[in-house]
Amino acid sequence: MKQEYQQLADIIEKSDNIVFFTGAGVSVASGIPDFRSMGGLFDEISKEGRSPEYLLSINHLEDDPDSFIRFYKKRLLLADKSPNAVHEFIADLEARGRSEGVITQNIDGLHEDAGSTKVDALHGSLNRFYCMECREAYHKTEIIEQDISYCRCGGVVRPDIVLYGEVLDELTVMSAMAKLQKADTLIVLGTSLVVNPAAYLTTYFRGDDFVIINKDSTPFDDEATLVINDDMTEVINAIR
C-alpha cells in the first residue's frame, strides 16, 4: 500500500467523528459528468441553444415552466446511475458510528442511495421534488415512473435543488457548519474547493486532521494534514 494511503487509513482508524465533504469528482466515478470540465454537463447543456445558467435558473422555471420541466427531465434525471465505492465507504462509516455524515455539493442524491442518512446537500437533491403551490413532496422514483410534471392541485412540481438566482438553504448550511465544528477529522473528496460559499464552509473545521483527496490541487492544500492527488476510488478501494 502506498505510504499516503496507509497514512489515510491510520487517520481514519484513530478518528471518532469524521465528516466528509464531497464534490463533483465523486459523481464522475458513477458516470455523471462534471458540470464545468471540458466535455462535461455544462458543455452538453450548451447544446440546448441557451446558456446553462439560464436553463438551470429560477427565471427559466418562472418564465416557461413547461420548458424547464422538459429540460430537467432530459438533462438532470439520471435514473441509471448508482452509488460507487466512495459513496458506499462513507455510508458504511456512518452506519458504524464513526462518521457524523457528509456535506456534499452534488445534487444527484447518490449518498442517500448508498445508505447515508446524515447528508447536508448544500445545493439540494434530485431525489426530492415538491409542488410550488401546495408544497406536496414527491420522490424521484414517482417523477420518473409516473412521469409527473404537475401536482394534482395543478401546481408545477420542481426538483428540490438550488437553481441559479436562489440562495442556499439556511438550515442546511447551519447543519453543515455544526458538523464541521464538532469533527475531529475532515476528509474532502472530489472537489477543487473553489466554488463559494460551499468551499468556504471548510474553514469552520477545528479538528486535528484535514485530508484532501482530489486529482488536482486546491487552494487549501497547504492547510491540509494529508493531500492525495490520485483517483479517489483507487484510494478508497485500497484502504477498505
Image (cartoon, rainbow, N blue to C red):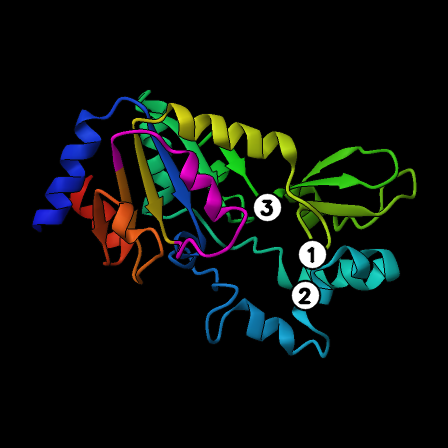
Judging by the rendered image, the residue that carries numbered circle 3 is 123
Instruction: Please tell me which residue is depicted at 57% across the width and 69% down the height of the picture.
Output: 42
Other residues around mark 1 within 10 Å, as few (<14) / some (14–19) / many (≥20) = some
Judging by the rendered image, the residue that carries numbered circle 1 is 164
Cβ atoms at labels 2 and 1 below 8 Å apart:
yes
Q: Position of residue 34 (x, y in %)?
A: 47, 63
Judging by the rendered image, the residue that carries numbered circle 2 is 53
Instruction: Give the side of residue 105 with respect to residue 128, left or right.
Output: left
**Real-space Cα separation, disc 2 to disc 3, in angstroms:** 15 Å
Q: Amino acid at mark 2?
A: Glu
Boundaries of the magenta span: 191-209
Q: Quadrant of residue 14?
A: top left
* Label 3 residue SS: loop
* Towards the viewer: 66 or 57: 57
Q: Position of residue 125 (x, y in %)?
A: 60, 43
Q: Quadrant of the C terminus?
A: top left
Q: Which mark is residue 216?
A: none
| Residue 201 forms part of the magenta stretch | yes
* Towards the viewer: 163 or 200: 200
**Real-space Cα separation, disc 2 to disc 1, in angstroms:** 6 Å
Other residues around mark 3 within 10 Å, as few (<14) / some (14–19) / many (≥20) = many
Q: Amino acid at mark 1?
A: Tyr
Q: Is residue 118 visible?
A: no
* Towards the viewer: 28 or 174: 174
Instruction: Give the side of residue 20 with respect to residue 11, left or right.
Output: right
Earlier sequence position, callout 2 versus callout 3:
2
